[in-house]
Image: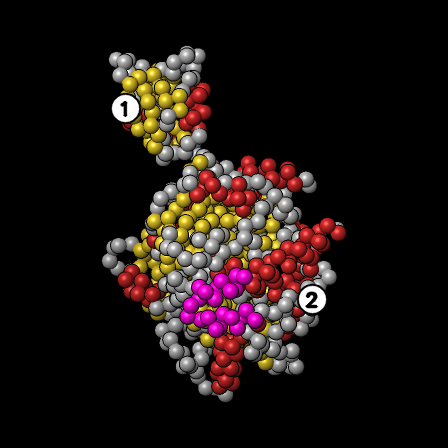
Amino acid sequence: MPRFRLNSLLSLAIVAPLAIAVFAPTPVSAQVFESDGIAMRFMKRVHQRSSSEVLGAFHSVVQNVRSATVELKRDGKRVAMGGIVDSTGLIVTKGSLVNTFGGKTPLVAELANGDQYLVNEIAAVDKENDLALVRIEARNLPVMELASGNKPGVGSLLATAGLGEEPVAIGVYGLTPHAVEMKNAMLGVMLSRDPGPARVDMVVEKSAAATAGILAQDVILSINDQLIDTGTHLIELVRTYEPGDSLRVKLKRSEEEMNLNVILGEWVAGPNQARHEFQNHLGGELSQRRSGFPSVFQHDSYLQPEQCGGPIVNLDGQVVGLNIARAGRVATFAIPADDLSRSVTKMLSAAGATSKGEYVQSRLSAKPVISDEQLDPGETRWIPRETSN
Amino acid sequence: MNYRNTTSLSFASGSQVATIRKFSLVCVLVLCLPIFASAQDKATPEIQRTAHFSEILTGDAPHNVADLRSMESQIQQTTKKGMNATVGVIVGPAQGSGVIVTEDGLILTAGHVIGEPGRDVTVILNDGRRVKGVTLGMDRSIDSGAIQITTPGKYAHLNVRATANLREGEWVLVMGHAGGIVKDRRPALRIGRVLASSQDVIATDATLVGGDSGGPLLDIQGNVIGINSRIGNRITANLHVPASQYLENIDRLKKSEVWGRLGGTQPYLGVRCEPDRQDVVVTRVTPDSPAALAGIQEGDQILRFNSRAISSFDDLKLMVNQYSPGDRVKVRIRRGSGDVITLEVELADRRKLDTN
């Protein structure tokens, strides 16, 4: 492909975008390049930073860690990645991706060697870091080793392991660990102003409620078995949850009662934030829970939300963190190895306590403890627990 | 091949000298941490270069871990240098980024960050210090712009590289205050490669988002090759203004000149004249158009458009097209009564009129 041809296409395509958002409010944004489709089609994949040639150079980097990496699947579809932390079958992953009402489909853990295991239970949950331990019945599994000392810094090259020879994604360490404040949760329904039960007036487009299938005129009866009397009550109750939390919503739709599973989204406040969120969503889906972390570092690996939960390594192949959220167009968050190690230690002891029949008191008691009342024989049991801090 | 090798080698040695000079400069700037800074200077490791490394510098993919390690140490060295010259800028209600390219504090940024010349700017340096600045000129058609720091001082700065010889596949670094300026948070680093480049725009897969606008696109050796401008739907659609555009027009930018029509707009005056007549006499004024609002009437003869003599309707249309919606233009006319008056017209955007 001659270079000039591509260039003339690009310079033609550039005319549209500048108009859109010129004197933008805070923060000034990159404007949207609408006609990129035409020009971008001609760009050669071989020149991209994640071309197969570049990923190939990382083969030996992820060679060790991939044997301790798992894919968690439902119905054959990946829902999360994870890392083995105990050779008898404990896997750390992103909590909000697995701590959901999965209905009757079991969660399956697939290893790099092709072995598949049924997940028995969620053994422990660290809500603060959005981490969870899931248990499979296994022996002598390879365990991922966390890097100690030798910390990566801004400019370090990183690779996210998958089950294959090639890493799932590569990137660069872009920002040192920092806290990310928790955003408010949003269900995405506008309620009727009439007194009485919580009747939905309108469902916000693309919101958690819309994804779950809530319709206008539905009456919300309960959330996680807590009865809802009024609209105000519903609003108050939703406020006690966090983005990424799974809810079982019982509602009445023209005399018929039904249950829907909702995963709460993030509240978007005001047009400035809405604008930024719009840009942040250009280029791919983001994690439902992408805020509220005590300490995460930022890197620029391009991950899908369901590729979070697994280990990320430096060029020495050491695990320097666990991908915890696809947070924006330019950012993936990872929990640094030290913090991960502390959380895993806590969760391991919590999981041990669980097996002795002790109950781990939730730090945030208002938060959901998910369990389906009726379990068919052989069905997985969901007993998420939180570590006490 | 031979030629390539020599050039990249001479690049390398040049940039090392530059690095050392820059570190000593940083020592001056970071007053509270002089010992720390000089210790870092000594500790900067020599970059172990693999045989393939010179090809990587010109856009090849790394082949193995040894290549990756060479790249990593080069990226880390460039990042230190680049971060020191990357700044946050606050212009009115807008926040963006920029990069210092001269010792006295000339900042390259995006046109849409500065908006117009002569505005006050708060510049946030990498060490957290805030200094004052003023917006200079801009080329609206390609989104280039500049700022001058007015607080006297010697500022860490980067070299600007002509981009005519930019190769597809070249490794690049991007820095900027993605998502807005946050206290005590440095600009975020990202890497990518050049996917396409032309005279007017560079496309890379180093991701950008709001707040990055105006921040630098660096080659792997730390030269400024572009300024972050805008994004598309795809993750690979990140667009930058080429550095050559700044190098070629630096005098115009410094003189606070504004030129180039904003892409995607159609400047609009709102008069019709008889095309074949020698005098440009208005035969129709569109109601509510900029011309009508300014008081231009049917029968007026248009003499000058911002001091340019107008000799035909085509001439007038051409002149209008050189400006952008929102521009205020002085139009000199002769009334039927013989009076010659000057009216100020604020041009509108024809596209917006259509949608209203």
- Label 2 sits on a secondary structure element that is helix
Task: Determine the residue positioned at 43% across, 15% down.
Answer: B275
The numbered disc on residue B66 is 2
Point out the residue furthest to the left here: A195
Q: Residues within 10 Å of mark 2 (few under 14, many from 20)?
A: some
Task: Determine the residue positioned at 57% across, 59% down.
Answer: B18
Q: Is residue A361 above or below residue B335?
A: below
- Return the residue nearer the eye: B339 or B336: B339
Q: Amino acid at mark 1?
A: Gly
Give the residue number, with chain letter if any, for mark 1: B295
Q: Residues within 10 Å of mark 1 (few under 14, many from 20)?
A: few
Q: Position of residue A368 (x, y in %)?
A: 41, 72
Q: Main secondary structure of the magenta part?
A: helix
Query: Of callouts 1 and 2, which one flags the residue occurring earlier in the amino acid sequence?
Result: 2
Identify the chain of the residue marked 1, using the numbered disc in the image: B
Tell me where residue A250 sits by quadrant. bottom left
- Label 1 sits on a secondary structure element that is loop
- Return the residue nearer the eye: A25 or A328: A25
Q: In the rendered structure, which segment of residues is drawn in magenta?
A: B21-42
Would residue A273 be found to the left or right of residue A6 on screen?
Answer: left
- In the image, is residue B28 part of the stretch drawn in magenta? yes
Q: Amino acid at mark 2?
A: Ala
Give the position of the C terminus of chain A as an image quadrant: bottom left
